Image (cartoon, helix red, strand yellow):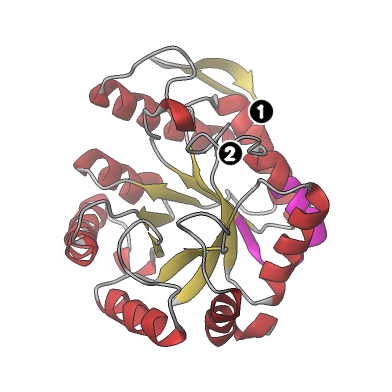
Amino acid sequence: MRLHVILWPIQDWPGMAATWQRAEELGFEGAWIYDHLAWRGHSPWDDAYASLAAAAAITSRIRLGTLVTTPNFRTPIPTASAIRTIDRISGGRLTVGIGAGGDSHTSDGDVLDRDWSPRERADRFAEWVEQLDTLLTGESVSAAGDYWSMREVTVSPGLVQQRPPFWIAGNGPRGLRLAARLGQGWIANPVTETPYEEVRGTIGRLEEACDAAGRDFAAMPRLLLTGFTEEAWVGSVDEYDDLAGRYAEIGITDAAIHWPRPGSEWDADMDVFEQIAASNGGNGSR
């Protein structure tokens, strides 16, 4: 299983730069940051795309990504432009994790002063992903959507990757169909008290959605976001290996753990964390 890390964009830059570089040295497959104005009320919370551009300039191997970016406060055209720019700065190392977003005010869910119904949120997300895809694959793009419109916009020239991969977070039927249609990867974020069973069932439905869309399910990376259940992913190397093995058996290909954050529920022994990273990432020699 490929191992990724989630970083916290809350340090001053010299410290944050050192963290990005250390993550690369430890051999993580990818490093991700949550795309919010503030997360669970924490501020300052640095902009995800600006942070990724800075990280791209001081790293050379590790993949970079958002986990996840949403239409909560981002519109398609400037988002596509930022994606293209980071793809170019990084030499093609950007993965775009995307999701519909939540509705909590502490994580910018209602900052546009609109309470979306679940159906509206899903409709709006689907339109947003479709427009991002079109902007990053076409030229002189025009669209008249229910939520966003554009006229003769060209963003895609200069991309290093043909189109940076979209890894889509979605557990419901519409989200899984969208992942199967436009995603190159899928993100699992279990929320129940039985995460293993939840993920196993959702992976089965994702495979069905891929089959219906004519997509190769086996070729699609499936990333598990950890740290929000009772599972001890960073308790010890043995505990990590046991959980990684169990989830690999049901189809998870990648796992993301959080960089230890003192004073929070994501605190962990840094020595153990680095041992897990080194045993799974090769200590930078990938």
Residue 176 location, x and y as percent? 27, 47
Between residue 284 and residue 268, name the one nearer to us: 268
Q: Is residue 238 left or right of residue 60?
A: left
> Relative to 24, does residue 150 appear above or below in the rendering?
above
Q: Secondary structure at mark 1?
A: loop
**Left or right relative to 161: residue 104:** left
The number of callouts visible is 2
Residue 101 placed where, x, y %? 40, 35
Location of mark 2 (residue): 136
Element type at mark 2 = helix
Residue 56: say if magenta.
Answer: yes
* Residue lying at the far front of the rendered structure: 263
The image quarter in which residue 90 lies: bottom right
- For image coordinates 60% across by 60% down, the residue present is 31
Query: What is the x, y in percent for residue 163?
Result: 57, 48
Q: Which three-letter amino acid code belongs to the residue tagged 1? A: Thr
Q: Which residues are magenta?
A: 52-64
